[in-house]
Amino acid sequence: MEKTNILLVDDHPKNLVALEAILDSSEYHLVKATSGKEALRCLLNQDFAVILLDVRMPDLDGFETAALIKEREKSRRIPIIFLTAVDKTDPSIFKGYSIGAVDYMFKPLSPTILKSKVAVFVDLYKKQEEIIQLNQTLERRVAERTSMLEIANKKLEEVGVLKGEFFADISHELRTPLSVIRGEAEVTLRGKEKPVAEYKKALQYIILLTEQLNQLVSDLLFLARSESGDIRIDRRQVPLQEILTHVCREGETLAIKKEIKVALTHQDQDILVQGDAQRLKQLFLILVDNAIKYSNPGGDVRISLQRDEKCGRVVVSDDGIGVSEEALPYVFKRFYRAEKAGSMARGGAGLGLSIAKWIVEAHEGVISVSSVVGKGSTVTVALPLSEKTKS
Ligand SMILES: Nc1ncnc2c1ncn2[C@@H]1O[C@H](COP(=O)(O)OP(=O)(O)OP(=O)(O)O)[C@@H](O)[C@H]1O
Ligand SMILES: [Mg+2]
């Protein structure tokens, strides 16, 4: 327990010794001063619960010392008890109180009374300290809460702005194919009857646009659900090789029209990851879909699977149009397309890679892209191996 400081001031050392004997306690730290000046010096760097101050002293007497103590902001509130053997007259007592003393005691002192008076002030001092501490804790907590609230508020504002942008983007994305569908139908129906083939062509185009719209809506739904934490990742041991075989087969189908080859090249065997097969397939299909979509007819799409100590690494590469250095950092951003007109014509909404990134991160993995314009792109996904593979 910390000791409480008490200042004893008397020009006669033997009086100080007597005071020390009366107040001797393990709870007190008694500081002695033999002059007013020395007392003031002690008050410069220490705090005290109470000051016992002799009235008659050479140089600076007790009253003058008290007046100086009361002048200073730091020591103003410390209670002063005057002790005197001589100045027992009413004017002296009155002077003592008017300077701000809390008590005026005559020598010889009654040890019991002095002890209990000092105890009262020590008690008061401790309570004050407690209040100060409580107040500081309270202030600190209020400051902490305030800054937490400020941060939360800022986040809410940011979310608000993002939401606004998101809805603006969504309505734009939905409106474009819808107005194309409507336009296609209106143009076909306008004017004279046309050959059946023309109606067929229009209807086929409308079906294609509807499929794209359908894909867009399900992508948007996926992102919305991923954000609200509604998408469950069903974790099981998944053999990556098996998933990639399926993805490759579906990729081949997607690529037929453009005569692009999709092939599984290098494959390390028996790579297991802890993950959701459905979601992982969705992820690799997004990458293969991009590789096909952004490749020139007759191109090559390669999928490889390798393992290192900690990860299974899937690399999807193409020899297509590539992404410029400036655009590369943004490709995972929602609704981002490197060349707006170009990828619009390819039917993309700019959501594929943001979904891919979400799935990879939900599996504690890492996804990265490198690309050279006109040469092609490479997307690498590293997924942590499941314990079974490691051993
Ligand atoms: N393999 C690639 N080669 C060249 N550019 C690519 C490739 N993959 C992605 N990109 C660029 O990154 C952008 C974002 O890709 P992302 O898959 O997110 O959207 P998208 O393909 O445009 O549309 P969506 O996938 O939603 O149908 C694309 O618009 C394209 O410009
Ligand atoms: Mg895409």
Image (spheres, rainbow, N blue to C red):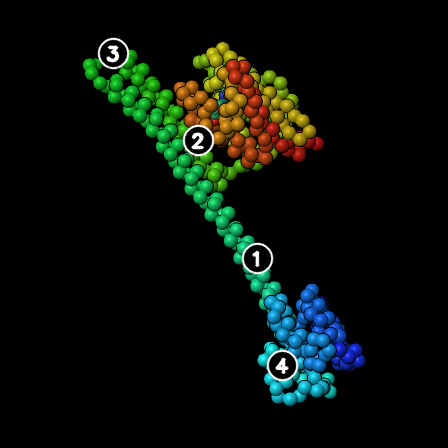
Q: Of the residues tagged 4 and 3, which is closer to the observer? A: 4
Tell me which numbered mark, 3 or 2, is placed earlier along the sequence.
3
The residues tagged by marks 4 and 1 sit, at their Cα atoms, a distance apart of 40 Å
Residues at marks 4 and 3, CA–CA distance in whole angstroms: 119 Å
Whether disc 2's CB lies below 8 Å from ligand 1 is answered yes
Near mark 3 (Cα within 10 A), the count class, few <14, some 14-19 or many ≥20, is few
Q: Which residue is mark 4?
A: 96
Instruction: Indicate the secondary structure of the residue bearing disc 4.
Output: helix
Nearest to viewer (mark 4 / mark 1): 4
- For the residue pair 366 and 301, the one nearer the viewer reads as 366
**Residue at the spot x=48%, y=18% of the render?**
294
- Residue 171, given in percent of the width and then of the height, sits at 36, 32
Residue 219 bears which disc, if any? 2
In the figure, 103 relative to 42: above or below? below
User: On the image, numbered disc 1 is attached to which residue?
Assistant: 140
Front tag of 3 and 1: 1
Q: Position of residue 238 (x, y in %)?
A: 59, 30
Find residue 200 and report its image quarter.
Answer: top left
Nearer the camera: disc 3 or disc 2: 2
Name the residue type under label 1: Arg
Q: Residues within 10 Å of mark 2 (few under 14, many from 20)?
A: some
From this view, report whether residue 26 is shown above or below residue 150: below
Rendering coords of residue 359 (x, y %): 53, 32
Task: Name which residue lies at 44% across and 13% down.
Answer: 257
- Residue 225, quarter of picture: top left
Q: CA distance from mark 2 to mark 4?
A: 86 Å
